[in-house]
Image: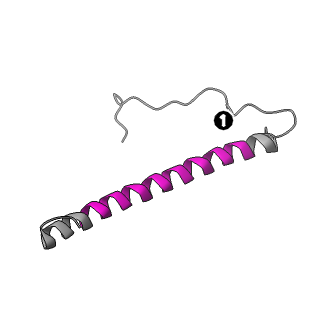
Amino acid sequence: MPDPEEPKLQGSPSRQPATPPLLFGARRLKVGVRMARRGGALVRMVVRVVLSAFLVAAVLATVLGALVIVVNGRLP
């Protein structure tokens, strides 16, 4: 039996679409705008890959330099 004191969920009195209806179908961005956004994402990806590779190379060089110092007592 439902509890009479428990509040009941009530929806909107009328149906409401998630997005308003459009006259001529879905809005589409122009091809140039879409390509510009993709190009910006591509540039960001390339920059992040290059910076990540540089970071890995710097860490690797530090570790190998420390290993050379441990073995030889100094850098060549």
Left or right for 16, reference 44: right
Report the residue at 78% width, 33% height from top: 21
- Residue 30 lies in what quarter of the image? top right
Residue position for label 1? 18
Residue 65 on image: x %, y %: 24, 64
Dot 1 lies on which element?
Answer: loop
Label 1 Cα neighbours within 10 Å, binned few <14 / some 14-19 / many ≥20: few
Per the rendered image, the range of residues in magenta is 35-63
Q: Is residue 44 above or below residue 55?
A: above
In the rendered image, residue 66 lying in the magenta stretch gets the answer no
Q: Which of 51 and 72 is in front in this view?
A: 72
- Position in image of residue 32 (x %, y %): 79, 42
Which residue occupies the extreme front position in the image? 76
- The residue lying furthest to the bottom in this view is 71
Residue at image coords 49%, 56% = 49
The one nearer the camera, 22 or 40, is 40
